[in-house]
């Protein structure tokens, strides 16, 4: 991992999006949780071309503009809709207050509806632009402060236990927490998120050295495709590192056609396409996945409500629950409230990256599942 990060920091050229950010006025509605403050910086959401079922990275063909200098003296240029620094891509985040309020409201509503049945946790994952991007480059960008945005979201929630990762990830920023060519965090970043969840839950996290490490090199993810296959990103592909569970575990996923398929928590994706290797985690994105830890018989259970950022964290939850139910809200169509009540679910964990909390389409999809 140190070698991978060393490659990351060895070359510093920046690539910046400006023309594709279409501004939208910040909502003037008040906060639901008194005493919260809004994040500073750009207060408009970039328009992206993804479908409602997809995540909110932009997907525009690359355009090369003349080389510039930024305030830190580094070379900068613009490629498509991704900020590229050397061999590393970053996604802009722009706070949208109306969507943030809706997200906080729907999570709170589930917490209220499940009082006496389930404990509801919320984990908002900051993206790499706020954690690992060089401070001198970050300071010159029109992108909102994610730390403040997370504080605003959590300050607006009731009957919910927040899991704040921002400072923890920042303290590990020199490690391989995020992919260079893709918008997701790595399993190491997800492990630090899991540790904070364990702290919030009041349980001891399992040490990372208990797991068997699997490595799948030559990963070129969404940033690579979003920049029209940027040579700067192609020169240093990512390695997807996965930590295989040590428990006796079985897993079944239900796909979008309703077909149930037995699968592995960690899949060998060595021979898969370079763009597909993040799918090593829980078989990728499916409406519903059920994981059973056969080493436990205590009835412990958890529902994870997630987009694909959750995939890398879910394997770390297995030692703590007999049953883990994974709901990808982009594809699941039934009431989460009814599911949790009917199955007497112990814990509910939302896992969403920052961009999901500013996407009207994604927040609407979550909202529809919590009547």
Image (spheres, rainbow, N blue to C red):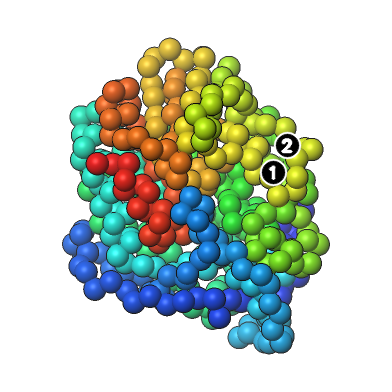
Q: Is residue 2 visible?
A: no
Give left or right: position of 70 versus 148.
right
| Separation (CA) of disc 1 from disc 2 | 6 Å
Residue 299 image position (x, y, % from top left): 37, 17
**Quarter location, residue 153:** bottom left
Q: Quadrant for residue 232, please give it.
A: bottom right
Find out whether the residues at labels 1 and 2 contact each other: C-beta distance under 8 Å. Answer: yes
Please tell me which residue is depicted at 72% across the width and 32% down the height of the picture: 268
Callout 1: SS:
helix
State the residue at coordinates (39%, 14%): 298
Q: Residues within 10 Å of mark 1 (few under 14, many from 20)?
A: many
* In the foreground, 221 or 191: 221
- Give whichever of 4, 348 is nearer the camera: 348
Say which mark, if any, is on residue 277.
Answer: 1
Q: Residues within 10 Å of mark 2 (few under 14, many from 20)?
A: some
What is the residue that sits farthest to the top in this orientation?
A: 297
Residue 203 is situated, as x and y percent measured from the top left of the image, at 41, 31
């Amino acid at each position: 991992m140190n070698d991978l990060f060393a490659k990351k920091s060895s070359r510093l050229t920046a690539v910046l999006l400006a023309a594709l950010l279409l501004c939208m006025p910040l909502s003037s509605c008040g906060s639901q949780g008194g005493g919260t403050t809004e994040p500073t910086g750009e207060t408009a959401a970039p328009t992206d071309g993804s479908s409602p079922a997809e995540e909110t990275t932009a997907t525009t063909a690359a355009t090369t503009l003349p080389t510039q200098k930024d305030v830190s003296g580094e070379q900068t240029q613009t490629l498509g809709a991704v900020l590229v620094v050397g061999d590393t891509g970053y996604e802009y985040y722009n706070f949208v207050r109306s969507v943030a309020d809706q997200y906080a409201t729907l999570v709170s509503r589930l917490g209220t509806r499940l009082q006496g049945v389930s404990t509801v946790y919320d984990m908002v994952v900051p993206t790499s632009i706020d954690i690992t991007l060089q401070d001198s480059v970050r300071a010159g960008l029109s992108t909102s402060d994610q730390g403040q945005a997370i504080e605003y979201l959590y300050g607006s929630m009731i009957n919910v236990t927040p899991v704040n990762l921002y400072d923890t990830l920042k303290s590990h920023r020199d490690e391989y927490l995020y992919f260079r060519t893709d918008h997701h965090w790595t399993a190491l970043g997800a492990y630090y998120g899991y540790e904070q969840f364990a702290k919030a839950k009041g349980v001891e996290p399992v040490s990372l050295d208990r797991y068997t490490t699997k490595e799948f090199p030559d990963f070129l993810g969404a940033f690579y495709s979003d920049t029209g296959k940027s040579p700067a990103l192609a020169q240093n592909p990512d390695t997807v590192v996965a930590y295989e569970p040590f428990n006796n575990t079985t897993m079944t996923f239900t796909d979008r056609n309703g077909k149930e398929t037995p699968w592995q928590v960690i899949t060998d994706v060595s021979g898969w396409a370079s763009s597909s290797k993040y799918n090593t985690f829980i078989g990728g994105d499916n409406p519903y996945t059920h994981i059973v830890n056969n080493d436990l018989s205590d009835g412990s259970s958890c529902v994870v409500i997630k987009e694909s950022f959750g995939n890398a964290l879910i394997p770390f939850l297995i030692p703590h629950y007999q049953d883990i139910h994974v709901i990808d809200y982009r594809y699941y169509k039934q009431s989460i409230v009814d599911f949790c009540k009917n199955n007497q679910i112990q814990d509910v964990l939302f896992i969403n990256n920052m961009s999901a909390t500013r996407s009207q389409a994604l927040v609407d999809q979550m909202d529809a599942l919590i009547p």
